[in-house]
Image (tube, rainbow, N blue to C red):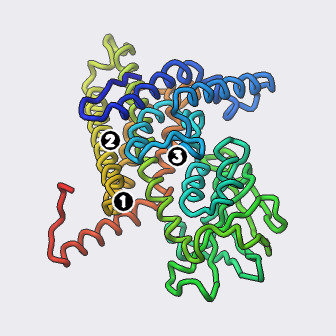
Amino acid sequence: MNVQAIASLPDKINQIRLLTARIINDEILPNENTLWRWRRDGTVSDEEKASARELRESIKLKVKQAGLWAPHLPDEYGGCGLTFLEHAYMNEVLAYAVGAAALFGVVAPNSGNQKILLKYGTKEQRQKWLVPLTEGKMQSGFSMTEPDNAGSDPRSIKTTARREGDEWVINGHKWFTSNGISSDFLIVMCRTDDPDGPAERNGKMTQIIVPTDTPGVNIIRGIEVWGRSTDHAEIIYDNVRVPVENQLGQTGSGHQAAQDRLGAGRVYHCMNSVGQMWRAFDLMVERAATREVHGGLLQDKQFIQGFIADSYIDIQTARLMTIHCAEQMESGADARTEISALKIYVPEAYSRVVDRAIQVWGAAGVTGDLPLVAMYQGARTLRLADGPDEVHKILIAKNVMKQHHAGGSWDFGN
């Protein structure tokens, strides 16, 4: 991975990018097969799994020594305290190696849950749940999506939490609960009926911490995605009782907490996509420069030259859109329209770049010898995650027309 300092950026961001690239190049890329083969190959021996685990812990230690662990969290909770923009710039380098984020302490849904605990949790909740989560002593899940309601509309949630004395009693049916199979606790989005809570529809939602071993938490199954088992779980909550102190934030703050989480997450996902597009692009260029066919190199064929040029344009456009959005969020501006725009464009561009790389590699492109298959599946999934494309297009149009009817045309300079 070729990463150079960017003259227009502060020294701190350049240092973060260069340090991250060094660990990616020296520690992760040469060991990708050892690190991750156990995930996709059921024949890996226990000895090989132990070796991979030891290697991962060794890399994590080097990441911590470099001061790059948990970039999304402040120092007091074990992170390195990067700003939103600094983290975005780091992500494009970090994502070059598929799976590398886990070795830097950034693992979904833990990272999103950590941010929610940091913003909405009490001091006691942070000590009980956030600290062990950051230290790797616990795993967490996020339980919002329901099988019978549109995931793009969290206000339609039917899972209820009813107040009985000093307890919340939770009943409902969730699926695609991220990391539900492996979690020690879940953050569950519920519809609450607290008479003291806000009356508007958004205010009916509350997020509640539920230990996974609580009676009534029935994990039905792990959901297959792309034909493979995952930690996404289908869960039925049957009269699950948890203490009121497990509530995150005020009663009715759940919808805003979800928006806080999803807005930032969309930008991080897109910067991750840029990093993986970068990797796919490098693989495509490498293949074009070395593969001979019909008496010449692929790089001399016009079709392949078109693939390279179109991919370069896709990556640059996606990257600049995402950085602009991160700058808007860093400044505190309303970036909802920008978030929706990049949420539509970047996964589509990501799909195109990876598809071209697979085509250039031929049959090898769809094997486990290269990371392109995982990228291809991830890019397609992103068009559904955090709101489907169609919903975001509606939001963009509404925001543009609202600006027009308020008497102003859209300002593309901001």
Q: Which residue is mark 2?
A: 319
Residue 74 badge? 3
- Could you tell me which secondary element the residue under label 1 belongs to? helix
Identify the mark at residue 368; answer none if there is no mark: none
Q: Residues within 10 Å of mark 2 (few under 14, many from 20)?
A: many
From the viewer's perspective, tell me whether residue 22 is left or right of residue 3. right
CB-based contact (under 8 Å), mark 2 and mark 1 = no
Residue 25: % across, % down: 48, 21
Tell me the distance, in whole angstroms, between the alpha carbons under discs 2 and 1. 15 Å
SS at mark 2? helix
Q: Picture quarter containing residue 334?
A: bottom left
Question: Is residue 242 placed above or below 70 in the rendered structure?
Answer: below
Residue at 53% in and 35% down:
373
Q: Is residue 246 above or below residue 13?
A: below
Camera-side residue of 319 and 200: 200
Q: Earlier in the sequence, mark 2 or mark 1?
A: 2
Res. 288 image quadrant:
top left
Q: Nearer the viewer, residue 109 or 138?
A: 138
Lateral position of residue 87 relative to residue 56, left or right: left
- Tell me residue 284's x, y (percent): 39, 26
Q: Position of residue 209 (x, y in %)?
A: 69, 64
